[in-house]
Amino acid sequence: MSTPRATIDLNSDMGESFGAWRMGDDAALMPFVTSANVACGFHAGDPSTIAATVALAVRHGVAIGAHPGLPDLQGFGRRTMQVTEDEVYGMTLYQAGAVRAFVEAAGARLNHVKAHGALYNMAARDVALSRGLVRAVKALGDGVKMYVLAGSPMETVARDAGLAVRCEVFGDRRYMPDGTLAPRSRPDALITDEAESVAQVLRMVREGRLTAVDGTEVTVRADTVCIHGDKPTAVPFVRALRGALAAEAIEVVQR
């Protein structure tokens, strides 16, 4: 009997420009990913950018998700805020609904929701905030999936609610012993070496494990890998990653 072929989805945060301000190179990155998380206007993005990003994803056959964040344009959604479960529900449904309108106008369907930045990290630790996100995704209906931090309370709450869940891992971020992402305030939070990032992804996909900042071995489930589209090295990195995945016979597919 043949060994099941390993597969992985590659997702990227996109559509994060707004007005005259430009972030990332979505056109160059889109051909290399299988899922796009489209900024909804709170942390980045605007109607014209959402429409253009959705059209680009449709052209390349990329699954389209909403990427809701905290209402913090100046801080790019990376600053924590005191928000309640109901506020998270409302802001998530509001933002995802806006992106869904553009997606359906383009003749496609909304595939998933993935929270952005501080909202993602806060919910990964806080069950109540996770419930707010999950309630919004359930309200969207239509089998919309939820991308969650692997092994987090967010994953547990989403699964308990019966949502289709995709566990996300990061190649360019270091992890804490509890499986959460190392805070960006730490000097070692980001992995800047391409080879190290690729090696971390390969190990997470093949072995379901990673090494935390203190040397602890952490078990993870890797359904989808995040490619940070706002980084200037995003395209070279995803090229290198896809080459390494192909060499390991790991197929890149929508999941």
Image: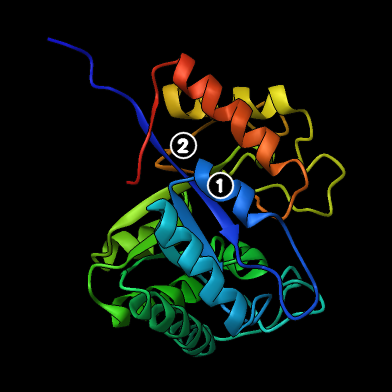
Going from the N terminus, do you reach mark 2 or mark 1 first? 2
- Residue 170, compared with residue 59, is above or below; it is above
Residue 226 is tagged as 1
Label 1, residues with CA under 10 Å away: few <14, some 14-19, many ≥20: many
- Residue 26, compared with residue 3, is above or below; it is below
Residue 217 locus on image (x, y percent)? 57, 27
Q: Residue at x 33, y 56 (%)?
A: 165
Residue 180 shows in this picture: no
User: Under tag 1, what secondary structure?
Assistant: strand
Q: CA distance from mark 2 to mark 1?
A: 14 Å
Residue 39 is tagged as none
Front residue of this view, candidates 100 and 162: 100
Would residue 108 be found to the left or right of residue 31 on screen? left
Would residue 253 be found to the left or right of residue 149 on screen? left
User: Under tag 2, what secondary structure?
Assistant: loop
Q: Which residue carries the number 2 mark? A: 220
Q: Residue at x 75, y 63 (%)?
A: 23
